[in-house]
Image: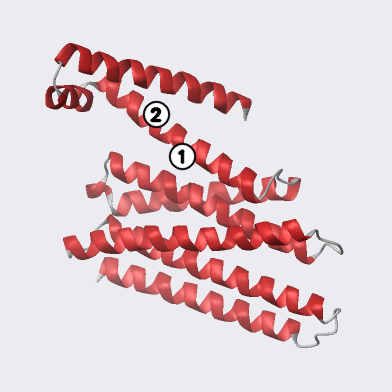
Amino acid sequence: MIRLQTYAVFSLLATITSVYYAFSSREQFYPAMVYLSTSKICFVLLLNTGLVAMCVAWQLVKRVFLGTLREAEVERLNEQSWREVVEILFAVTIFRQDFSVSFLAMVAALLLVKALHWLAQKRVEYIETTPSVPMLSHIRIVSFMLFLLVVDCLFLANSLGSLIQKREASVAIFFSFEYMILATSTVSTFVKYVFYVSDMLAEGQWENKAVYTFYLELISDLVHLSLYMLFFIAIFL
């Protein structure tokens, strides 16, 4: 975290310096903006600052809702990251005509949001297997899942808006389906947490918990499978 803070400070200083130079040398808004968008050095600095801002936001969200990560959560994060990179590379080959800086930014945001979802799922699993959980942990995980659902809906609305505007198969359809899957995963995780709380209030005597959990996972998998099928149908047909 300290290294990220140091890198973020230097990135911000470099960006401020480039912006100051652009406005001081051009003296007007439009020429300065043209210079910032055409200069390769300024463009790289601005892009780097955007990525740093995403990482800082991710760290803040993680610290507020989760605190210190456990070893199992870090392992889950590392394992899933490699799989997602492969999926993203596959998506890039499909939508290579839409490859741009905005596409890279959306991909980076998607990876960060997915990482938060993995952590939420792992934290719920940890709470389910822990005999005594503080009330603060319950408040944080519920708030975290609600936060993720709001983020999913916002990104989904943005992707659907772009898709409706273009009215053609573009990279927006990829992000739309991805955030639909993430939203359903968040709902599934929240319902599983509700099952855990219900069983806890019943002092572990809820006999049908395993049955309901099985059907929940089955429905969730079927929904995800249906969404993946619709995605490939929309792309290749």
Instruction: Specify whether 161 is left or right of 12.
Output: left
- Measure the alpha-carbon separation of dots 2 and 1: 10 Å
Mark 2: amino acid: Asn
Mark 1: amino acid: Met
Instruction: Specify whether 184 is left or right of 22.
Output: right
Is 36 in front, or is 20?
20
Badge 2 density bin: few <14, some 14–19, many ≥20, Cα 10 Å: some
Instruction: Choose the circle earlier in sequence order: 2 or 1.
Output: 2
Looking at the rendered image, the quarter that the N terminus falls into is: top right
Instruction: Specify whether 45 is left or right of 169.
Output: right
Q: Position of residue 2 (x, y in %)?
A: 62, 25
Vertical placement of 85 versus 157: above or below? above
Instruction: Specify whether 51 is left or right of 170.
Output: right
Label 2, on which residue?
Answer: 48
Label 2's element? helix
Q: Determine the image quadrant of residue 39.
A: top left
Label 1's element? helix
Is 115 in front, or is 82?
115
Q: Is residue 122 visible?
A: no
Which residue occupies 80% across, 85% down?
206
Q: Determine the image quadrant of residue 24.
A: top left
Is 42 in front, or is 170?
42
Which residue occupies 50% across, 47% down?
112
Vertical placement of 118 versus 2: above or below? below
Label 1, on which residue?
Answer: 54
